[in-house]
Image (cartoon, grey):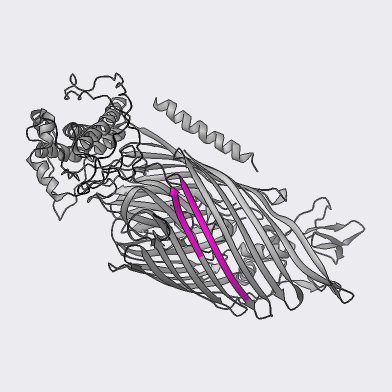
């Protein structure tokens, strides 16, 4: 069975790779992984790892909700094509998160992560332990996590739940007088009822918690109950293998929904409902035990314990202990059995549990002055899991322009219309996992495709990730091979290669990466070797140091040292990082960001970012030349070998004086934009470094934001952002064409004209966010912003509402208005409105439709005013599997 499942995963991945390799791929995948971890207190951390640097800004709402939006920023130095217009559902199926959608489509709100939980949950959001992650912290007892969990590091789909030590049901329900039922109402359980702390169901198969009983409630109409479904005959569990006999389960009845949405159940109906749900879950746990799917069994038994007291509560407490013992979780198994004796001292299996406890190793105390290495657990059977998403959207847009033209002093209408957008954008993401208590194996494939139906030459396809990942939970080593995104070590961008790490102590880890950069470049792709050392891995204060050597075409492209220092604690965090290029003798990147979350509901975030744009690299000398000569082809003039021909799509073919870079044999045409050609024609490495330095700008950005919660449903906030990009001097060799006035390249290194500084752009924005404003569970945002730069001033009003008309439908509405003016006398006015609706079918298929219209009025002193109407639409689906 294991081989068949592994073969199925591998076959599906191969099919996807083949499908997308022959397709004709837009923004890259920006999510690397999503994992859930439960700490010793039972509190859950959802870690979202990105493939690009990010900054956590804020989240809304605060406190408890069934929906949440996290807003984050991406530094301006990251090219927009790497993340713009991205949308994907990357959350594996879990008992906590129903939907996790990442979207960068709306530039007005910025990149965001939209969470939808199975039921209302309490949460907090903070930056991760590096500048490429965000953590969502979920408190225990809110979404089915309990208080004695240990860190598992498993993904959301497979993170084993931890049962409670004390059952605290929300209501006290009489149980029939059977031996096991009597144990369920014993004194410890009654005492627990006095606390009345509600624990939500863990499994997505479990129903929502019972509503609070209203005073003098009127008994609702009777339910229509379908005939009982006979329980299938299952293999016997226990009885002959040293284990207690698994209880006989009652047939499960299928309950038909009734019309009353706020139905109040009687005590008898509550008991009947709990017993019915528990029987189904116990059957699922039994089947998991028989198949060796122990984590599935633990999940099912845990869900039974989260239901109100029922006839199977004692059996679930017993069998979850047995399941944990079989997974090698000896300490947890002991806690489960001790809980059984505490809750059910007169239970039918009390003697067996006491005997079992005597065989389990006692929990030895750990001395504070010495670290005790835990015993190596016995390897459990591998379980298999796969999840992912496939989406395809068609986008279209048409513009109508109304203007005038002047001929012979007479103004005449000059109207036109054209289709300016017609594209099919698709994304696929798939993860296959094989795991047990020692190993976590992961196969990942992520790709994007953009088919431009107006100009096929502008279609793009890209495989952003295709790798195998291995983690050892016991010995703390990991490895990854394939196309992957860098997660540190000074590697900037995607690469094809190998990365590995080893934790030689709880707080120290060494890492190494080697490979070839995956982005397309002129000439050979850079190759690198990187090593890093992480310290304070499991401490609030920690960081890393690294060294990287990157070469291209036999010369050093980038040689840098750097590191990061971070402080991470619930409610506050700070992260600083620096990259220093030894070859250029200059700071390549310096970034600092911090957040502070106060108990009063006030959140602060700040960021300072200084970096070279593009990143310092000797390849920048080539990129600059590519702007004027990358598409030129030179060859000897067959009629005069002392001259060369230039063929350039921007200019007509011309003849220039003798060029040393012409090929002697007159047989090949080539573009003179590789480092090898520059070196062969007399350029020294020092000259290339200086040329690259001239063609590298400096980007600076400072951001400060604050938000304040007002009661439970409102949040107000403001942001201030200042940014600028330095100018670049003239570089290269060129001559001015007297006919066209353009400067044409006359040197192999190309010609790069001087570019002025952008000046400092200031942006001030304020926003008001609310929930339950127009409809129940909706989220509304009102934003005002003002931006000023040396050339342009603009102001904008933005209003968005996201609502849920029903359980299966979502509706987004957006209104936007903008005014802009520049120092040349130009003015623009824009009004826009859009609506987007989505329908969820069978929880894993979503169909979405978006319609929008823009009205723009443009006036410039050198042109006649124009009015532009633009309509756009998109439609497509997303399949989560």
x and y percentages locating residue 355 in the rendered image: 9, 30
Say whether residue 488 is left or right of residue 790.
Answer: left
Q: Residue at the location (83% across, 50% down)?
A: 667
Say whether residue 675 is left or right of residue 213.
Answer: right
Say whether residue 483 is left or right of residue 266.
Answer: right
Q: Name the main secondary structure of what is drawn in magenta.
A: strand
Give the camera-side residue of 870 and 259: 259
Vertical relation: 488 (above or below) 407: above
Question: Is residue 236 inside the magenta stretch?
Answer: no
Question: Is residue 807 inside the magenta stretch?
Answer: yes
- Image quadrant containing the N terminus: top left
x and y percentages locating residue 597 in the rendered image: 32, 66
Residue 746 visible in rendering: no
x and y percentages locating residue 760 in the rendered image: 55, 78
Residue 126 visible in rendering: yes
Give the camera-side residue of 567 and 498: 567
Vertical relation: 265 (above or below) 779: above
Q: Residue at the location (25% across, 34% down)?
A: 273
How many callouts does the rendering have?
Answer: 0
Say whether residue 854 is left or right of residue 751.
Answer: left
Vertical relation: 718 (above or below) 566: below
Residues rendered magenta in the picture: 799-820
Give the camera-side residue of 34 and 533: 34
Give the camera-side residue of 26 and 486: 26
Q: Residue at the location (78% across, 63% down)?
A: 415
x and y percentages locating residue 797 in the rendered image: 53, 70
């Amino acid at each position: 069975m294991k081989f068949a499942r592994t073969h199925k995963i591998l076959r599906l991945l191969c099919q996807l790779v083949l499908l997308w390799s022959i397709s004709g791929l837009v923004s890259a995948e920006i999510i690397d992984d999503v994992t859930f971890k439960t700490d010793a207190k039972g509190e859950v951390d959802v870690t979202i790892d990105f493939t690009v640097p990010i900054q956590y800004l804020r989240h809304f709402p605060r406190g408890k909700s069934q929906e949440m939006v996290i807003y984050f920023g991406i530094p301006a130095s990251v090219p927009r094509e790497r993340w713009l217009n991205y949308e994907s559902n990357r959350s594996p199926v879990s008992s906590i998160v129903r939907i996790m959608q990442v979207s960068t489509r709306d530039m007005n709100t910025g990149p965001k992560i939209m969470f939808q939980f199975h039921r209302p949950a309490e949460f907090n959001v903070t930056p991760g332990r590096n500048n490429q992650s965000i953590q969502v912290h979920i408190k225990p007892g809110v979404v089915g996590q309990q208080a004695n969990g240990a860190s598992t590091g498993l993904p959301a789909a497979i993170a084993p739940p931890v049962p409670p030590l004390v059952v605290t049901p929300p209501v006290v329900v009489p149980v029939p007088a059977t031996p096991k039922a009597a144990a369920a109402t014993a004194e410890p359980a009654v005492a627990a009822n006095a606390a009345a702390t509600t624990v939500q169901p863990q499994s997505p198969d479990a129903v929502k918690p019972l509503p609070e009983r209203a005073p003098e409630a009127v008994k609702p109409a009777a339910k229509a109950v379908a005939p009982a479904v006979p329980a299938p005959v299952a293999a016997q569990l226990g009885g002959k293998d040293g284990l207690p006999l698994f209880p006989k389960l009652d047939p499960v009845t299928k309950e038909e929904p009734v019309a009353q949405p706020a139905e109040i159940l009687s005590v008898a109906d509550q008991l009947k409902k709990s017993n019915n749900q528990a029987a189904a879950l116990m059957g699922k746990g039994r089947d998991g035990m028989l198949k060796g799917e122990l984590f599935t069994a633990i999940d099912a038994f845990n869900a039974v314990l989260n239901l109100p007291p029922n006839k199977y509560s004692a059996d679930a407490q017993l069998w979850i202990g047995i399941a944990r013992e079989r997974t090698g979780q000896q300490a947890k198994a002991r806690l489960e059995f001790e809980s059984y004796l505490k809750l059910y001292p007169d239970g039918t299996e009390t003697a067996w549990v006491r005997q079992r406890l005597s065989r389990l190793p006692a929990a030895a105390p750990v001395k504070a002055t010495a670290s005790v290495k835990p015993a190596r657990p016995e390897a459990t059977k591998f379980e298999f899991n796969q999840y992912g998403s496939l989406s395809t959207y068609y986008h279209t847009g048409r513009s109508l322009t109304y203007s005038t033209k002047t001929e012979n002093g007479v103004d005449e209408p000059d109207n036109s219309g054209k289709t300016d957008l017609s594209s099919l954008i698709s994304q696929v993401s798939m993860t296959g996992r094989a795991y047990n208590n020692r190993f976590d194996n992961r196969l990942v494939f992520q790709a994007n495709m953009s088919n431009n139906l107006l100009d096929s030459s502008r279609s793009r396809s890209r495989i952003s990730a295709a790798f195998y990942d291995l983690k050892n939970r016991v010995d703390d080593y990991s490895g990854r091979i394939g196309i992957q995104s860098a997660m540190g070590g000074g590697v900037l961008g995607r690469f094809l290669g190998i990365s590995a790490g080893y934790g030689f102590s709880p707080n120290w880890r060494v890492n190494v990466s080697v490979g070839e950069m995956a982005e397309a470049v002129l000439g050979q792709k850079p190759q690198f070797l990187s090593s890093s050392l992480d310290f304070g891995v499991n401490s609030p204060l920690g960081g890393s140091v690294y060294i990287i050597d990157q070469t291209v075409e036999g010369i050093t492209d980038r040689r840098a040292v750097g590191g990061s220092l971070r402080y991470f604690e619930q409610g506050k965090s700070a992260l600083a990082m620096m990259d220093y290029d030894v070859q250029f003798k200059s700071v390549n990147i310096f970034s600092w960001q911090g957040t502070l979350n106060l108990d009063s509901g006030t959140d602060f975030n700040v960021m300072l970012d200084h970096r070279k744009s593009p990143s310092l690299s000797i390849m920048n000398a080539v990129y600059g030349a590519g702007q004027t000569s990358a598409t030129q082809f030179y060859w000897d003039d067959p009629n005069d070998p002392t001259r060369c021909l230039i063929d350039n799509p921007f200019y007509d073919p011309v003849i220039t004086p003798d060029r040393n870079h012409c090929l002697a044999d007159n047989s090949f045409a080539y573009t003179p934009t590789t480092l090898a050609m520059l070196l062969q024609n007399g350029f020294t490495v020092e000259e290339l470094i200086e040329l690259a330095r001239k063609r590298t700008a400096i980007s600076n950005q400072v951001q400060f934001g604050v938000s304040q919660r007002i009661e439970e449903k409102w949040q107000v906030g403001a942001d201030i952002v200042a940014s600028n990009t330095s100018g670049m001097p003239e570089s290269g060799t060129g001559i001015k064409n007297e006919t066209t006035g353009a400067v044409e390249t006359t040197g192999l290194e190309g010609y790069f004209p001087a570019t002025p500084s952008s000046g400092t752009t200031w942006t001030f924005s304020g926003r008001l966010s609310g929930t339950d404003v127009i409809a129940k569970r909706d989220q509304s945002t009102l934003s005002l912003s003002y931006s000023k730069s040396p050339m342009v001033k603009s102001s904008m009003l933005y209003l968005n509402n996201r609502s849920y008309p029903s359980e299966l439908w979502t509706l987004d509405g957006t209104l936007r208005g903008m005014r802009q003016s520049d120092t040349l006398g130009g003015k623009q006015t824009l009004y826009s409105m859009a609506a987007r609706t989505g329908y969820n079918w069978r929880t894993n298929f979503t169909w979405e439709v978006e319609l929008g219209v823009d009205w723009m009025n443009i006036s410039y002193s050198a042109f006649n005013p124009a009015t532009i109407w633009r309509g756009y639409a998109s439609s497509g689906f997303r399949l989560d599997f």
